[in-house]
Image (cartoon, rainbow, N blue to C red):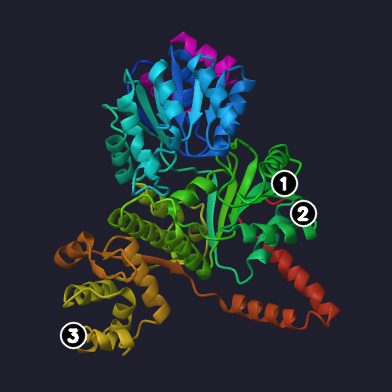
Amino acid sequence: MQKKYELLKEVFGYDGFRIGQEPLVDALVSGRDAMGIMPTGAGKSICYQLPALMLPGITLVISPLISLMKDQVSALVQSGVRAAYLNSSLTEGQTAKAIANAVDGVYKIIYVAPERLFTPRFQYFAARAQISMVCVDEAHCVSQWGQDFRPSYLEIARFVESLPVRPVVGAFTATATDTVRRDIVELLKLNDPVRVVTGFDRPNLYFGVKEPRDKYAAVTDYLCAHPDASGVIYCLTRKTVEEVHARLCADGYRAARYHAGLSPEERRSSQDAFLFDDVRIMVATNAFGMGIDKSNVSFVLHYNMPKNLESYYQEAGRAGRDGQPADCILLYGKRDVATNRFFIEQDQENDALDEETRRAVRLKEEERLRQMTFYCRSQRCLRAFMLEYFGEQAPPRCGNCSVCRGKTEKVEITREARITFLFVRDLRYPVGAAAVCDALRGVESEGVVRHKLDGMRGFGLLRSVPAARMREIMDHLIASGYLVRSAGKYPTLTLGAPAYEVLEYGGTIVLYTAKSGTEQEKTSARGTRRLRSCLNSCAACAQSLQKVSASLRSSFSPMQRCTP
């Protein structure tokens, strides 16, 4: 096995393996199937590229991402490895030439899109080639519970079975819940795979959520406080990318843009400018980032909320790859929920599925969107929320997120929770969270009257709880599993197992919530608003406001500040 260390140094330039890499390499080289769940930046590609150089035949890497294929093939070729890719970006002539070279054994590693596996040309190659290994990148795409389910991934197992000799199979992804991991093993038909899950925690990353009135002002406040930092600003739509990029450039920032609507040449130019530090800010949709290995990204700002925690974790994880402190800040807005729901409804990736399966996939996507929304509105430790979502145990406080570093207080809500549990338990049929909140507060809303909740025993028992606090309590109970929210357009509530345990055996339920501002803070806020109102006509007020803004910017995030 000395050869693996020599290749690691000579081809890839590394003196040693990162956590989790070596057992996966050893498994694949020895002919054992493997599954690696490793966060963004952990070095998944080494886990299959290195074995590919040690095995006798050809390695196929199945990937859904054209940009990632190009980047990785380019890097391999520059390192002296014979590699190629096959996807829709090639012309018919280029595809024919690549297939002919593949049949002749020119390439050691071939990247291929899953949709190409059963094309006649590729089948001609596969029947004649010595394929030693098949590796599935972004393996979560095989699961309907995954954040980017692709029906074409369901054909991978059939392709492997169709080969003259079954190769060793590896599956890799950055994000996968327990359910998705089980699907990966089952649907890809991995044979007793070596499983490596390196953990999702990135202690050097600060996670923050803000809900600013003016998102662009929040971005420029951050950039002013970090004048030399390099980072990515993710936007949901191409239109938003264009708008934010244009405003930044007009305000004198060195920024590039990246989205699928640009030509390949424009995308390549923007990517290179960012990678080589010609610009320090990349404004992009989620089309940017896969396979980008830039170590000095010190912030990732999300201008909009992504549609699920898997996507958010993957995109935010592009910060801090050098191990230095980095900021991952999400600028939440209620309109983001509607935009994501529209994307879910308009998703054409699943058109090949039958109606029942397509509906099931959509319901699961809506549930992931709800979890993402809970994250944005949570007063729990954000890191603990995320780690528990991915099935990891986490301490209740991390000390490095906006909740833990913010002014929060621990409030016992056992009484409110028990009343809520009893009310939901006694419902004749499940109803939605809004109707339950209204009924418990004694509000005779349309939903309460329609479902005749005003006649129930618990009606009005929590009328002293403000509406905002009641919604906060309800969100916490749902996110913590005490209440289970059904999928669908009109979700309803039922009791989860933890709620039954509380009702039967007792227990304490607490909520971490934002502290009310001190009188000094409230006075300062009122003073700032008055300054803004007369800014246009009063130079003295303008100078005072600049001092206030500078003070606010100095406390925007926990990273070490740079002096402008």
- Categorize mark 2 by other alpha carbons within 10 Å: few (<14), some (14-19), many (20+): some
In this orientation, does residue 462 appear?
no
Residue at 62%, 50% in the rendered image = 259
Give the label on residue 280, or none.
Answer: 1
For the stretch drawn in magenta, what is the main secondary structure? helix
Query: On the image, numbered disc 2 is attached to which residue?
Result: 253
Furthest-left residue in this view: 504
Q: How many marks?
A: 3
> In terms of depth relative to the viewer, which is nearer, 68 or 554?
68
Furthest-top residue in this view: 2
- Mark 1: amino acid: Arg
Give the label on residue 457, or none.
Answer: 3
How far apart in space, not on screen, are marks 2 and 3 (Cα)? Answer: 60 Å
SS class, disc 1: loop
539 sits left or right of 59 in the view: right
Instruction: State which tag comes first along the sequence, 2 or 1.
Output: 2
How far apart in space, not on screen, are marks 2 and 1 (Cα)? Answer: 8 Å
Residues marked 2 and 1 touching at CB (< 8 Å): yes
- Mark 3: amino acid: Arg
Q: What stretch is highlighted in magenta?
A: 1-28
- Mark 2: amino acid: Tyr
How far apart in space, not on screen, are marks 3 and 1 (Cα)? Answer: 60 Å
